[in-house]
Image: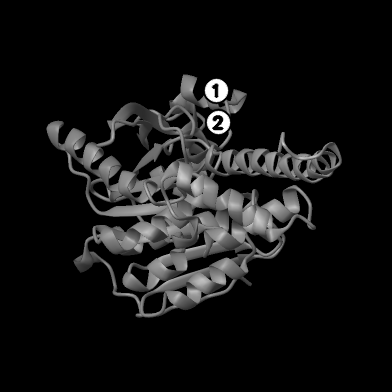
């Protein structure tokens, strides 16, 4: 360019400088977008978490912290929660226990089994202890853990299922070994998941036949669709889809996974595990249509479908209330109890909320 006449050099600079600026800005935007995609914000413990952790018996729980070292060296932070032998007020646990007794579901002779609870993107395990309070009323052992790149766990990136579905079996194995060393048994296994946690469970089912039943709250059917929707809502509806797509693919490349391959609705047909599906009809983060697609893909097994008319993404369980919590508990009891003590359910049961 130095050999060009001054007039031509000026014209070239007028063209190349704006182009280089656009490309640089585009790269910066896609890099920031990819980072927001694969690096969830780690939320600190809240006052309510500190209160429960300081005095778990008051909430009906005995808690045992454990660590799970994964094969890739990442360490996950977990808690094993059981029913407290000497409960304090424990309003939610006592209320659920009373409901079960009124329904003729008496306490078992021994622990019914173990339920693993998986949180959503940006969440942490302590949030799930509020769900565990209901499950321990039926004498289920509950295991909550921070997913990689969340809470107190290690890991830099969230892969929306690629690594998380490999982590889940390792968590099960670690807890099982710990219990076996203590002379206890893991028992029948169930799984509960919310949002991303629900979607991870659905991706895991084909490779985890030991899981007998799952409860999923607001899962997504296709990651690509949810990311595009989220970017349009959170940034600007006029944001070009190609820019979102590039950011998503860049994030996947950085974290080592293909975002377009994360499709729980494609994994569900490769399993026959009974599913309890719950979704808020006002959910704007993951529309209820995603659960309906999973529902259609999950033919050939027992399915319970619960739509919560006034619920958004973050308040499905609160709006569902104790009636739906009781249904979840009974769903787990039905499928995790020993086969000879439970009447077999019909092969396909699809129910909507009233």
Secondary element under disc 2, as helix, strand or loop, is: loop
Asked if residue 20 lies left or right of residue 263, the reply is right
Against 201, is 167 above or below? above
Looking at the image, which is closer to me, 54 or 301? 301
Binning the other alpha carbons within 10 Å of mark 1 as few (below 14), some (14 to 19) or many (20 upward) gives few
- For disc 1, the marked residue is 51
Q: Are marks 2 and 1 in contact (CB under 8 Å)?
A: no
Q: Position of residue 38 (x, y in %)?
A: 53, 42
Q: Residue at x 23, y 48 (%)?
A: 109
In the picture as drawn, the residue positioned furthest to the right comes out as 7
Point 34% across, 64% down: residue: 334
Above or below residue 232? Residue 341 is below
Q: Quadrant of the N terminus?
A: top right
The one nearer the camera, 322 or 214, is 214
Which numbered marker is on residue 28? none
The spot of residue 185 in percent (x, y) is: 18, 43
- Residue 148 lies in what quarter of the image? top left
> Left or right: 241 with respect to 70?
right
What element does badge 1 sit on? helix
Mark 2 vs mark 1: in front: 2
Residue 207 visible in rendering? yes
Label located before the other in sequence (2 or 1): 2
Residue farthest toward the top in the current orientation of the protein: 54
Quadrant in which the C terminus appears:
bottom right
**Residue that badge 2 annotates:** 42
Compared to 59, does 22 lie above or below? below
Q: Residue at x 49, y 55 (%)?
A: 259
The percent position of residue 142, horizontal first and vertical second, equals 36, 42
> Residue 352: which quarter of the image?
bottom right
Count of numbered marks:
2
Q: Where residue 298 sits in the image (x, y, percent)?
A: 42, 74
């Amino acid at each position: 360019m130095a050999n060009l006449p001054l007039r031509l050099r000026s014209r070239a600079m007028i063209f190349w400088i704006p182009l280089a600026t656009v490309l640089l800005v585009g790269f910066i935007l896609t890099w920031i977008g990819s980072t927001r995609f694969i690096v969830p914000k780690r939320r600190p413990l809240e006052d309510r978490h500190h209160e429960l952790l300081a005095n778990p018996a008051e909430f009906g729980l005995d808690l045992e912290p454990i660590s799970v070292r994964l094969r890739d060296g990442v360490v996950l932070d977990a808690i094993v929660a059981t029913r407290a032998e000497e409960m304090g007020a424990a309003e939610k646990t006592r209320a659920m226990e009373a409901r079960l007794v009124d329904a003729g579901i008496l306490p078992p002779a021994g622990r019914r089994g173990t339920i693993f609870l998986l949180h959503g993107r940006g969440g942490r395990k302590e949030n799930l202890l509020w769900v565990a309070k209901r499950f321990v009323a039926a004498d289920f052992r509950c295991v909550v853990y921070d997913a990689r790149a969340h809470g107190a766990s290690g890991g830099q990136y969230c892969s929306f299922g690629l690594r998380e579905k490999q982590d889940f079996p390792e968590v099960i194995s670690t807890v099982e070994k710990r219990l076996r060393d203590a002379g206890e048994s893991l028992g029948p296994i169930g799984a509960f998941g919310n949002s991303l946690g629900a979607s991870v469970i659905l991706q895991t089912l084909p490779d985890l036949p030991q899981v007998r039943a799952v409860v999923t709250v607001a899962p997504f059917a296709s990651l690509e669709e949810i990311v595009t929707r989220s970017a349009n809502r959170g940034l600007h509806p006029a944001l070009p889809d190609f820019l979102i797509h590039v950011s998503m693919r860049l994030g996947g490349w950085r974290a080592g996974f293909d975002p377009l391959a994360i499709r729980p609705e494609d994994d569900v047909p490769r399993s026959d595990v009974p599913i309890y599906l719950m979704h808020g009809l006002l959910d704007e983060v993951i529309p209820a249509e995603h659960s309906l697609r999973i529902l259609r893909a999950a033919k050939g097994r027992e399915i319970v479908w619960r739509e919560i008319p006034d619920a958004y993404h973050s308040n499905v369980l609160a709006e569902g209330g104790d009636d739906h919590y009781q249904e979840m508990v009974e769903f787990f009891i039905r499928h995790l109890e020993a086969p000879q003590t439970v009447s077999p359910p019909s092969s396909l049961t699809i129910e909507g909320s009233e």
